[in-house]
Image (cartoon, rainbow, N blue to C red):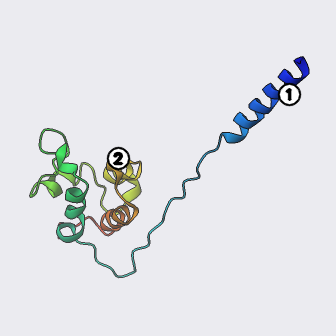
Amino acid sequence: MKKLLKITILIIFALNLNSCYYDEIFEQEIDIPEGTVVEFAADITPIFAANNCTDCHNGSQDPNLTPGNEYNSLVPEYVVAGNANNSELYSKLSGGHGNVDATSLALIAEWINSGALNN
């Protein structure tokens, strides 16, 4: 009886170890075609609306992403023109803040790396 109990405990333990797994998360890298001009008004501000950023960033929390205030609230405090990796906006969004999708992140990075123009 003791032997059966030991075997049962061993099997349960082995099943528990085998049932633990981790999903691998593959970062989806999106390439913006060379020569594509990413415009702030046409490409970047719709991302803020689509991800409901203005629910929190509505003037009571910085940066103010309400229509007409986005650019002046972001540049230069949250965006280092020409360098997405050193821009707080890109770093926070790529870290999961706001659940911004990979295509939107690629557009934001391209806009920043292209000079973060108010176009």
Residue 113: image quadrant is: bottom left
Asked if the residue under mark 2 is in contact with the one under mark 1, i.e. CB atoms within 8 Å, the reply is: no
Q: Residues within 10 Å of mark 2 (few under 14, many from 20)?
A: few
Percent x, y of residue 89: 31, 51
**Label 1 is placed on what type of residue?**
Ile
- Three-letter amino acid code of the residue under disc 2: His
Q: Residue at x 83, y 21 (%)?
A: 5
| Quarter containing the C terminus | bottom left
Element on which disc 1 rests:
helix
Q: Is residue 103 above or below residue 4?
A: below
Residue at the extreme left of the image, as rendered: 68
Which of the two residues, 94 or 22, is positioned nearer the viewer here? 22
The one nearer the camera, 50 or 36, is 50
> Where residue 32 appears, x then y in whole percent?
39, 74
**Residue 71: percent from the left, percent from the top?**
17, 58
Tell whether 20 sits left or right of 110: right
- In-front residue for pair 10/110: 10
In the displayed orientation, state which residue is furthest to the bottom.
Answer: 35
> Among all residues in the image, which is located at the extreme front?
1
* Among the two numbered marks 1 and 2 on one chain, the one whose residue lies closer to the N terminus: 1
Q: Position of residue 54 (x, y in %)?
A: 17, 49
Q: Which residue is mark 2?
A: 97
Circle 2: element type: helix
- How far apart marks 1 and 2 lie (CA) works out to 48 Å
